[in-house]
Image: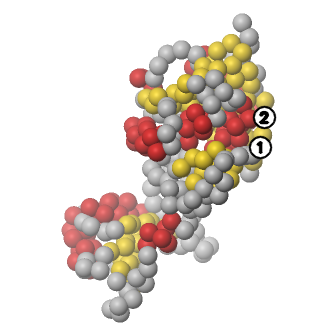
């Protein structure tokens, strides 16, 4: 192995039934990273795996999967794979190849894929390793992580633009399905006096708390059962159409009289169904559309 090829990639062709378990085993045994891709990609046999964004796919791997594991210079790829195969009780070590990887600055290479993102009139979502392009703008420092929400997806962008236009200062805001906390943090930075973030995923709540601390944003985060009662001036929920429809009564009840509700995670073709689900409570309209997604908004009747 040359001096310029410290790291190696272990490339394994394997069936769907073992792909996820093999990935987990390789990580447990010391692989630096593992990815799974369609071995038939860019061929007539390529298969789509995911349906509507955010939903759990029916299958967890492709019929012909390719597992790629990055291993450190001191690791023996063949030994690592043999140990993983043994853990899974496979009859034989799967077909595989080992290829050298140039000794690059992996952190720099990964970070270069995530640039600051401009949103709305004065918002910048900035990874921690970047300087803010405009220090006088509304700066949200967020790194890609486990929880959804860095501003790159149209649904998040739409909600952020809506909040920028709607929060003028002094409001109470509920972010239901807070993910990374990006909307809750933005609401605080726009001047909201009280912000609550709720998510069903404990990892998301932890990530949101960490992101809020990094951004010096005061936000109350909780799981649904621990969320504070009461109504809010502004309620925003960036989830998906089906859960939004199921939560129509609950979310609408959290909006005070005269308050505003914004929903995203809704495809344009799903807008009328969601609007109909909320019609008994709050009249919603399409506020804005972006790349096939919409943000719906409306005001609760004043008392």
Q: Quadrant of the C terminus?
A: top right
Where residue 302 sits, quadrant-wise, is: top right
* Residue farthest along the bottom direction in this orientation: 2
Dot 1, how many residues are within 10 Å of its Cα: few (below 14), some (14-19), or many (20+)? Answer: some
C-alpha distance separating marks 2 and 1:
7 Å
Disc tally is 2
Q: Please say if 147 is above or below 275.
A: below
Most foreground residue, 72 or 64: 72
Dot 2, how many residues are within 10 Å of its Cα: few (below 14), some (14-19), or many (20+)? Answer: some
- Can you give x and y, in whole percent of width and height, for residue 67 in the image? 40, 70
Query: Of helix, strand and loop, which one carries label 1?
Result: strand
Query: Would residue 140 be seen by someone viewing this image from the given angle?
Result: yes
For this view, does 35 lie left or right of residue 232? left
For this view, does 119 lie left or right of residue 51? right
Q: In percent of the image, x 68 and y 12: which residue is there?
A: 257
Q: Quadrant of the N terminus?
A: bottom left
Residue that numbered label 2 is attached to = 286
Disc marking residue 199: none
For this view, does 302 lie left or right of residue 67? right
Query: Of helix, strand and loop, which one carries label 2?
Result: strand
Q: In percent of the image, x 75 and y 46: which residue is there?
A: 121
- Can you give x and y, in whole percent of width and height, for residue 215 in the image? 51, 43
Q: In percent of the image, x 37 and y 73: which residue is there?
A: 70
Q: Please say if 130 is above or below 137.
A: below
Where residue 194 sits, quadrant-wise, is: top right
Mark 2 and 1 residues: CB-CB less than 8 Å, in contact? yes
Most foreground residue, 274 or 1: 1
Disc marking residue 289: 1
Q: Please say if 77 is above or below 270.
A: below
Where residue 166 sits, quadrant-wise, is: top right
Query: Would residue 13 be seen by someone viewing this image from the given angle?
Result: no
- Can you give x and y, in whole percent of width and height, for residue 294 in the image? 73, 41
């Amino acid at each position: 192995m040359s001096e310029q090829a410290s790291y190696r990639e272990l490339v394994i062709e394997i069936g769907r039934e073992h792909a996820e378990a093999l990935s987990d085993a390789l990580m447990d045994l010391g692989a630096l990273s593992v990815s799974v891709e369609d071995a038939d990609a860019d061929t007539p046999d390529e298969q789509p795996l995911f349906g509507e964004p955010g939903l759990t796919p029916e299958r967890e791997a492709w019929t012909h999967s390719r597992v790629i594991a990055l291993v450190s210079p001191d690791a023996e790829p063949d030994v690592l794979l043999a140990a993983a195969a043994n853990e899974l009780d496979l009859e034989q070590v799967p077909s595989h190849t080992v290829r050298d990887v140039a000794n690059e600055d992996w952190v720099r290479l990964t970070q270069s894929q995530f640039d600051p993102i401009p949103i709305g009139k004065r918002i910048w979502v900035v990874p921690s390793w970047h300087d803010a392009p405009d220090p006088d703008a509304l700066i949200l420092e967020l790194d890609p992580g486990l929880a959804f929400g860095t501003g790159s997806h149209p649904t998040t962008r739409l909600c952020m633009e809506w909040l920028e236009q709607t929060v003028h200062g002094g409001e109470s805001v509920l972010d239901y399905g807070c993910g990374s906390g990006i909307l809750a943090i933005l609401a605080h930075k726009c001047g909201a006096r009280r912000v609550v973030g709720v998510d069903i995923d404990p990892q998301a709540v932890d990530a949101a708390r960490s992101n809020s601390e990094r951004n010096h944003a005061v936000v109350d985060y909780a799981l649904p059962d621990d969320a504070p009662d009461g109504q809010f001036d502004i309620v925003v929920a960036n989830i998906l159409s089906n859960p939004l429809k199921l939560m129509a009564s609950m979310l609408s009840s959290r909006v005070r009289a005269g308050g505003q509700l914004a929903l995203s995670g809704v495809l344009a073709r799903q807008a009328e169904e969601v609007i109909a689900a909320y019609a008994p409570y709050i009249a919603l309209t399409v506020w804005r559309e972006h790349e096939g997604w919409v943000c719906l908004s409306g005001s609760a009747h004043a008392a």
